[in-house]
């Protein structure tokens, strides 16, 4: 990943990237909410929500394993899957409940995650 890390480190050698950490935590919370059927609207409380919840778990695992294993590829994959999960949630919420605050916030996460993935892909070349 690009050198956008804070000067903090974890266990002396792991630099903390604040946006990647925030995105990792957001997909963890989103995945938990989806798998527990504690979401807004009706559609995400069914099978579509479970599917997106599993993708959130995969994104979270990709972030964690990529961080500890120092794998840029897994971290970048985590960003891509996270942008897909947030895009899915944005679309379903928009169709289910309309342009509510939750829908718009999910859209913001989509733009941020997708943009971060694009920056990482362009920086790695």
Image (cartoon, rainbow, N blue to C red):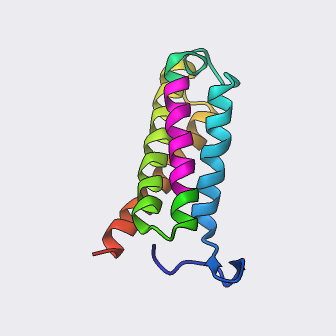
Against 33, residue 86 (above or below) is below
| Towards the viewer: 70 or 109 | 70
Answer whether residue 62 is magenta in the image.
yes
Left or right: 57 in relation to 114: right
Against 89, residue 121 (above or below) is below
Picture coordinates of residue 8 (x, y %)? Answer: 70, 81
- Residue at horizontal 72 percent and vertical 77 percent from the top: 11
- Residue at horizontal 39 percent and vertical 68 percent from the top: 119
Against 80, residue 122 (above or below) is below
| Towards the viewer: 57 or 98 | 57
Left or right: 118 in relation to 50: left
Q: Among all residues in the image, which is located at the extreme left?
A: 125
Report the magenta residues as a range.
50-63
Picture coordinates of residue 78 (x, y %)? Answer: 47, 53
Q: Among all residues in the image, which is located at the extreme front?
A: 69
- Residue at horizontal 35 percent and vertical 75 percent from the top: 123
| Towards the viewer: 40 or 34 | 34
- Residue at horizontal 36 percent and vertical 62 percent from the top: 118
Q: Residue 29 falls in which quadrant of the image?
A: top right
* Quarter of the image with the N terminus in it: bottom left
Main SS, magenta residues: helix
Against 57, residue 4 (above or below) is below
Q: Residue 38 falls in which quadrant of the image?
A: top right
Answer whether residue 30 is magenta in the image.
no
* Quarter of the image with the C terminus in it: bottom left
Picture coordinates of residue 33 (x, y %)? Answer: 68, 31
Numbered circles on residues, count: 0
Picture coordinates of residue 98 (x, y %)? Answer: 54, 24
């Amino acid at each position: 990943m690009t050198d956008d890390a804070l000067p903090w480190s974890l266990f002396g050698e792991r630099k903390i990237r604040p946006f990647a950490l925030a995105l990792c935590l957001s997909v963890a919370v989103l995945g938990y909410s989806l798998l527990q059927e504690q979401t807004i609207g009706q559609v995400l409380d069914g099978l579509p929500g479970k599917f997106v919840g599993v993708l959130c778990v995969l994104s979270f695992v990709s972030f964690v394993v990529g961080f500890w294993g120092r794998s840029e590829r897994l971290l970048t994959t985590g960003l891509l899957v996270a942008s897909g999960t947030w895009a899915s949630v944005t679309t379903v919420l928009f169709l289910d409940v309309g342009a509510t605050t939750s829908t718009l916030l999910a859209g913001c996460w989509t733009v941020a995650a997708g943009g971060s993935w694009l920056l990482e892909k362009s920086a790695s070349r």
